[in-house]
Image (cartoon, grey):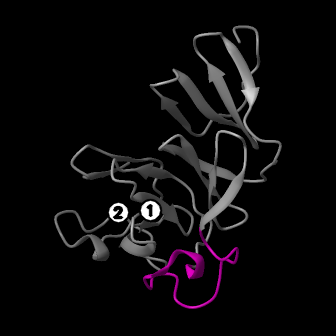
Amino acid sequence: ALESYVGFCPSFAFEPSTRALYYVDSDLIMRLDTVAGTISTVSTVTFRGLGGIGLYRGNLVVADTVRHRLPRVTPQGVFTSLAGTGFSTGSNPLIDAPAAEAILSGPGQLAIASDGTIFFTTDNNAVIRALGTDGIVRHIGGSTTVRSNAGDGGPAKQATFGSISRLAVDARKRLYVV
C-alpha cells in the first residue's frame, strides 16, 4: 500500500471494526486494509462519476452521479439500488417520493446518520435531500433554480447553496454543510 499510486480521491469512509478505509479512486471504489497494508478493488463495476461514499451496517452507500442513483454495495461487491429512477429529469425533483420513484439529478456528496438516514446532494451540489429509514426521499434544502449562499438562520427548505463540497452529520443528527 505504501508504494501504490492513488489518484483523485473525492470521498472516503472508515470502518472502525475492520480498520478498513474505503475510498473513491477515479472511477473505482477501493479498500485499504490498514492492518495488512493492502489495497483491493471493492467491485469490478466501473463508474463514470462517483460522488460521496459512506458506510452503514457494513454496506457502502455510493452517490452514482452519472446513473442518477444511490446504490448500496455489500461486502461481497453486490450492488442494489437504494434510491433513484436512473433519470435526471421528470416530475419536480424536489417533491418527496418513495425511493424507487425519486428523481435524483446527479447525486454528489453524502453523509449517513447513525439511524440510517442518508443525506445527499443533487442538482450539481445545490440541493440537499434525505433518504429516510421509511424509504421516502425528502427535500431538505436548496433550490434547483437559485444558486447562491443565502438563508442562514431561516428555514432549511428556503436556503440556497452555490455548490456544496461536503456534508457531515453528527450523533444528534445535525447536518453540517460546507
In the rendered view, would you say 108 is above or below 146? Answer: above
Mark 2 and mark 1 in contact? Answer it, CB < 8 Å: yes
- Residue topped by disc 1: 162
Range covered by the magenta-colored residues: 83-102
Q: Is residue 101 magenta?
A: yes
> Is 26 left, or right, of 107 in this rendering?
right
Residue toward you, 51 or 138: 138
Is residue 86 shown in magenta? yes
Give the alpha-carbon distance from disc 2 to disc 1, as whole Å.
6 Å
As drawn, 8 above or below 36 = below
- What is the number of callouts on the image? 2
Q: Residue at x 40, y 75 (%)?
A: 138
Residue 64 sits above or below residue 134 on the image: above
Q: What type is the residue that disc 1 sits on?
A: Gly
What residue did someone put label 2 on?
149
In the image, taking residue 99 as reference, residue 151 lies left or right, namely left
Label 1 neighbourhood size at 10 Å, few (<14), some (14-19), many (20+)? some
The answer to whether 50 appears left or right of 21 in the picture is right
The 10 Å Cα crowd at callout 2, few under 14, some 14 to 19, many 20 or more, is: some
Residue drawn at x 30%, y 70% as measured from the top left: 159
Where does residue 12 sit, x and y in percent of width and height? 55, 35
Instruction: Where is residue 78? Give x, y as percent.
Output: 72, 50
Which one is nearer the viewer's eye here, 94 or 99? Answer: 99
Residue 122: percent from left, percent from top: 53, 66
| Furthest residue toward left | 153
The quarter in which the N terminus is drawn is: top right
Please identify the quarter of the rendering in which residue 36 is found: top right
Give, as a three-letter code, the residue at label 2. Asn
Tell which of 81 and 167 is nearer to you: 81
User: Residue drawn at (39%, 71%), measured in percent from left and top?
Assistant: 134
Main SS, magenta region, reads loop
SS at circle 2:
loop
